Image: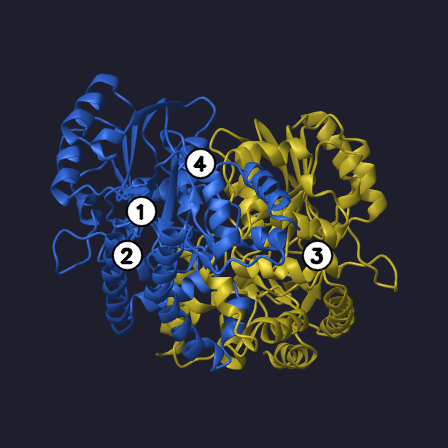
Chain colours: A blue, B yellow
């Protein structure tokens, strides 16, 4: 197939996938001979994937235990929550387990969100797309001139003025990776107690840091202090296991009870249950933390290198991806396809993201070796 | 632990699991030294599990492809539906893919069911437990003296009198395995066109037969004729893969559109997607059909043997399990625990099933060798 025809085909595929990237499976079946060498659209820690695969291989494959994972019903939601409780030190009554964070987002939006929601722009589109038809959404748009960061004081006064029923914050935010510090989060919570639901999505929080000891951050412990707080956590990104669909939320126990009374009894697969089981193991978490820190350092270096490239502007990020603005009138869709077809590197065109005016792409950090290739390809672009 | 203490503990566990059996994982962690040798509570075709495991081993384990299944996001719902479409010959626009049938049950009950639902008793309890609080449920109770079978004429006139918004039928029914023939299903559909939703759960239909060629049965093809028809299908039972959480529903395309507009975008795991992919393969489906027929014959033989046991009454079944009434004042809970602790055989105590007055257990058919052991244990009971 010629490059031009392929470009049109990819455009079609992208449009039919809505505001989300088509899966790599679907894309691969389309591009045929052209190969994706590096999927820099994909937001996950590859070192963590290797670690999990290693455990899986030793625990299940080599011991012929894979059958048990496939054949039998996994434990019910509440029993899986006990593993998570042990891993994160939060009472299991406050934990709701999801078939990926996306199921939890849907459950929260459909069961607890009424009337008006304030969503930050740009952000992960499911937070407004999956709302019920009768829910109003009010956008709080981040300013490009302020590096797409959130001005906490301004945000709090915006909330005070508009009195929404629900707030949604991603920390770090997707697609630009801006990070709210622990004290900023507390400041927001302290000033929005009258809001019914404060949803904080911490799917990328394992990649953030406040100082150079890179210790793990989370607002989960605040659940006992703020009744309106709902923390959503995907396992896909930090543990590199998007395919097994695992996530959880921490929230008031009444909300957990309500959700479980209405379903979600067997929404965890055998593999996801196995993951949560090893997540409680000391040996695993120690090794995971090394993989996590290695990846953060790798990503810091990657961002530094990206910043040296002249025709792009890199926005500050504490996630495992960077939002990049293309200068010189380069169009993001064309750029994305050219990069794919010339170097086999697939980055995220952000032209479909509401709240981003200009020409933006999002580039994920991968392994050290892959990042070197991404940098080279970006530098060689002309 | 002493047998008596253990009995009390199991009773506790059972009560805390609601109306569903605790998972075998949870139970095993409790009974410790006592071992479950055969889980005859578990409703799945073990020969199909073996077949799938064989494919998985060749396709993913031996080729080192397991990583792809775990690391990447699986395709979106609509793309997975295309595989199912190819496998069952129904337009993919009419197919909604679920994280197990249970997710679909929940989605249907919460999105399309309003006002009054008629549910048959005894049946799978989620169909009334997961209803929204403001939905009325009306039970149509099957008569023990009529072998818990459904009198179609009587049922139709019951519906006509009560004018519900939704009907729920399991075919074959769980826990007794009664089967409605193709012509009976059509008779019901023809006379209930005014009902908004007719839900038929065909999770056990691959085990049913109308004649001795044992060809596969399904009402899926009726979807174009009856707009109100929703067919729900679990893959857990017939394909023996409860752990991967896979199911689908066939329904009017407007309903599929509605559900996908509200979520369910990435609810299929990498393994479930892999399953649906091989389900389209000729080689797999041929081998599966052999495993299916072998299991049906095995089950027929099992039922014949059960019928020779004096202290029980076996109700007619065309599923992979039989409902059994214990005579001589034997209590089903005690019987179940005694059988587990004496022979390592775990059967389903039905004392928590609404609509069953008396002392009932449900026994699943397993492999030929296991069925021999089950029969022996039941015969030796005193």
Distance from label 3 to label 4 (Cα)?
61 Å
Residue neighbourhood size for the residue with mark 2, other residues' Cα within 10 Å, grouped as few (<14), some (14–19), many (≥20): many
Mark number displayed over residue A331: 4
Left or right of B290? Residue A257 is left
Residue bearing mark 3? B177
Residue bearing mark 1? A322
Q: Position of residue B59 (x, y in %)?
A: 61, 72
Nearer the viewer's eye, disc 2 or disc 3?
2
SS of the residue at dot 4?
A: loop
Distance from label 2 to label 1 (Cα)?
10 Å
Give me the chain letter of mark 1.
Answer: A
**Do marks 1 and 3 share a subunit?**
no
Which mark sits nearer the N-terminus, 4 or 1?
1
Residue A91 visible in image: no
Distance from label 4 to label 2 (Cα)?
23 Å
Give me the chain letter of mark 2.
Answer: A
Distance from label 4 to label 1 (Cα)?
18 Å
**Do marks 3 and 4 share a subunit?**
no
Q: Residue at x 73, y 31 (%)?
A: B227
Mark number displayed over residue A337: none
SS of the residue at dot 3?
A: loop
Q: Position of residue A218 (x, y in %)?
A: 21, 50
Up-down relation of residue A259 to residue B2 (above or below):
above
Residue neighbourhood size for the residue with mark 3, other residues' Cα within 10 Å, grouped as few (<14), some (14–19), many (≥20): many
SS of the residue at dot 2?
A: helix
Which mark sits nearer the N-terminus, 4 or 2?
2
| View extreme (top): residue | A161
Residue bearing mark 2? A302
């Amino acid at each position: 197939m010629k490059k031009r025809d392929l470009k049109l085909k990819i455009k079609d595929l992208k449009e039919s996938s809505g505001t989300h990237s088509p899966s790599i499976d679907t894309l691969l079946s389309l591009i045929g001979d052209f190969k994706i060498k590096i999927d820099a659209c994909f937001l996950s820690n590859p070192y963590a994937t290797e670690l999990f695969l290693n455990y899986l291989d030793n625990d299940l494959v080599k011991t012929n235990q894979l059958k048990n994972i496939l054949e039998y019903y996994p434990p019910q939601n509440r029993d899986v929550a006990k593993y998570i409780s042990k891993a994160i030190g939060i009472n299991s009554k406050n934990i709701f387990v999801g078939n990926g964070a996306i199921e939890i987002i849907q459950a929260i939006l459909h069961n607890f969100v009424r009337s008006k929601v304030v969503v930050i722009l740009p952000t992960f589109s499911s937070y407004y797309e999956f709302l019920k038809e009768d829910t109003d959404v009010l956008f709080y748009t981040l300013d490009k001139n302020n590096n797409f960061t959130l001005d906490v004081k301004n945000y709090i006064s915006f909330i005070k003025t508009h009195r929404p029923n629900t707030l949604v914050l991603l920390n770090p935010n997707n697609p630009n990776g801006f990070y709210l510090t622990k004290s900023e989060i507390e400041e927001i919570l302290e000033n929005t107690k009258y809001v019914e639901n404060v949803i904080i999505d911490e799917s990328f929080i394992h990649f953030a840091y406040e100082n150079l000891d890179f210790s793990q951050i989370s607002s989960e412990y605040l659940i006992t202090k703020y009744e309106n707080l709902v923390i959503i956590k995907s396992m896909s990104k930090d543990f590199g296991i998007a395919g097994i669909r695992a996530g959880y939320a921490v929230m008031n126990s009444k909300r957990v009870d309500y959700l479980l009374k209405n379903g979600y009894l067997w929404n965890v697969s055998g593999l996801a249950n196995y993951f949560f089981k090893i997540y409680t193991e000391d040996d695993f978490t120690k090794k995971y933390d090394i993989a996590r820190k290695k990846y953060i350092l790798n990503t810091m270096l990657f961002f530094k290198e990206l910043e040296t490239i002249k025709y792009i502007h890199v926005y500050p990020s504490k996630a495992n991806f960077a939002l990049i603005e293309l200068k010189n009138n380069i169009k993001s869709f064309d750029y994305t396809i050219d990069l794919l077809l010339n170097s086999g590197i697939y980055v995220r065109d952000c032209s479909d993201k509401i709240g981003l005016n200009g020409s933006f792409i999002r580039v994920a950090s991968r392994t050290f070796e892959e990042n070197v290739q991404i940098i080279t390809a970006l530098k060689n672009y002309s």
